[in-house]
Amino acid sequence: MMEPTLSHYLLVSGALFSIGLLGVIVRRNLLIIYMSLELMLNSANVALVAMSRFYGKLDGQVMVFFIITVAAAEVAVGLALIVALYRKRQTAEVEDLATMKL
Amino acid sequence: MGDQLKFVQLEMMVVALGLLVLIADLAMAPSRRRLLGYLSAAGLFVVFLLSFRDGYTALVNESTEAFFNSRYKVDGLALFFKRFFLIAGIFVLVFAVDFSERLRSGMAEYYSFIVFALSGMMFAASANDFSMLFVSIELITITFYILVSFQRHRLHSLEAGVKYLILGAVSSAFMIYGIALVFGVAGSLQFDDLHAQQSELIQSKVFLFGMLFLFAGLAFKISAFPFQVWAPDVYQGAPTPTTAFLAVGSKAAGFVLLIRLLVAAVPEVTAEWTSVLLVISALTILYGNLCALPQRNLKRLLAYSGIANAGYLLMGIVAQSEEGTVAILYYLAGYLFTVMAAFMIINLLTKEGEGEDISCLSGLSKRSPFLAFAMTLAAVSLAGIPPLAGFFGKFLLVKSVATEAFGNTCFFVLLAVAVFGVVVSIYYYFGIVRTIFWGRRKADEPTPPPVTIGLPVRIVLGCCVAAMLYLGLLPNKPVKWAETAAKVGVTSK
């Protein structure tokens, strides 16, 4: 059985980031886009924790706590906003967000 | 530790003020909530005065080594920006009180969120570490998601909020991934450590990649070229006080962090990237100015002009000199008063539900000579015509690039683009001036009554006009202030 090394963790984190970014670009539903965004934030967490362990320095792990807290606040605000928009428009598709043009 | 909290005393006061507003709201009769806005503006003014106290300014010379291991800096630059943000906060609060009827609900929350966003900006002014940078940036951004979408009964406001939310979250995801990569190479989150080992770090492609991601996150804040798509829609849809705060505060917070990172911490990376930054700066100027040309909506027009101004400000970073930093500070100071005045006047002239079409300015010279005068000054200053603040700021920026230009001929291209941008911008800014003095209303429309302006708004507008003239006519003293502020260094270890 092979021991996972730093590069394995970084590969996973890179893959998560790319999947998240792809989701943000490709998907048309606001909630799914928002989920993909969370994936992007968590990919950075994986990388930080892995590197912090690799260096034996706790800075990275402390940073992860900050990121998780901030992401929670962001989700609270973001979901409230998406719900408020849904109530107004009865839709959560990005195509319907184009009422302000020139 | 208790002794060391003196480094964050101003921020603590501001946060306490925000909480106080929330609590006081419970005890206050709804009809008197406007008072709360004025009180918090007065509170911020007291904090502003306290920032001049000898006990506080002495901290600049004191080493912050002991405080969070110099992750938090109280130096000239921090002090300059803290005062800058406080002034912006006071103006925006007065503005918000004037606006509060249109919010329909949650007036006191609106004031307190402005104060919280302000505290985030003040923390950002001192950030000298990636965790500090990230948390302060997010404090600003997340409060702005709420401030932008505060008029929940207006679809435009909600739509702007969602757009800002999605794009803002993407940019913060890029930023923290960049932080993770930089941490992975450097093994530290502190700017001082990066500075110490920058010549080795710069060899690493992963490090440069991480810095690029970080730059993308900050470029979103200042709305620089490839990351500017959100600006027009968000500026247009957001409640006008939020737009003004976004244009001034959020942009300045992005710039103070860019100065801390690119000018103070890793100047070698900036030197490596000169051509990239130069192209971004030039494209931002071109994009902003050219897209502003066909705009009829005033808030959208100012959004594009804000993009163009971000391009001019980036010239100061491209110059990579202390002169460039001085120019950025000076230009931002002028921009604060100019843009604040412009948004306030737009707000006074438009009613709820109406678009902010440029035609609302027509006949302003007859309706209110004072507003016409102030708006003309703002437009002329933004266009960069002497003798106003905008001219001298642009002059300093161009000068800072020109002095470096003899080492690098590409800089001349940037100068040419900047001058071309100014010429283009004169066209649309003078469209505003033309409408004010010579714009005609449709024949069947009744002549609108003279505009009534409340005393606090009148005072703020007076301050803005005075500051625009002062910064333009007597630049010696403000330049000295900017020079003392621009001496940013990194505590060597």
Image (tube, coloured by chain):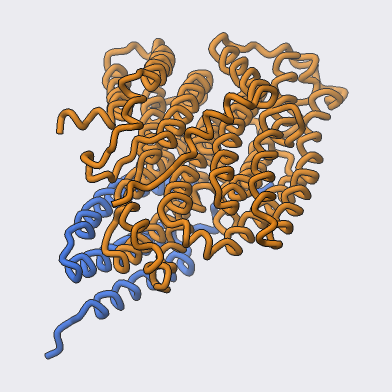
- The location of residue B368, given as percent across then percent down, is 73, 14
Residue sitting nearer the eye, B473 or B437: B473
Residue B374: image quadrant is top right
- The location of residue B53, given as percent across then percent down, is 36, 18
Residue B379: image quadrant is top right
The hue of chain B in the figure is orange
Residue sitting nearer the eye, B389 or B396: B396
Q: Is residue A100 visible?
A: no
Q: Is residue B3 visible?
A: yes
Left or right: A69, with B252 as reference point? left
Left or right: A26, with B134 as reference point? right
Q: Quadrant of the N terminus of chain A?
A: bottom left
Looking at the image, residue B274 lies above or below residue B440:
below
Which chain is the one coloured blue? A
Left or right: A39, with B42 as reference point? left
What residue is at 22 percent from the left and 43 percent from the top? B68
Residue A56: image quadrant is bottom left
Left or right: B426, with B397 as reference point? right
Looking at the image, residue B51 lies above or below residue B185:
above
- Farthest residue, direction bottom: A1
What residue is at 23 percent from the left and 57 percent from the top? A64
What residue is at 52 percent from the left and 22 percent from the top? B95
Looking at the image, residue A80 lies above or below residue B249:
below
What residue is at 48 percent from the left and 33 percent from the top? B484
- The location of residue B255, given as percent across then percent down, is 50, 44
Counting the numbered discs, the total is: 0
- The location of residue B245, given as percent across then percent down, is 51, 33
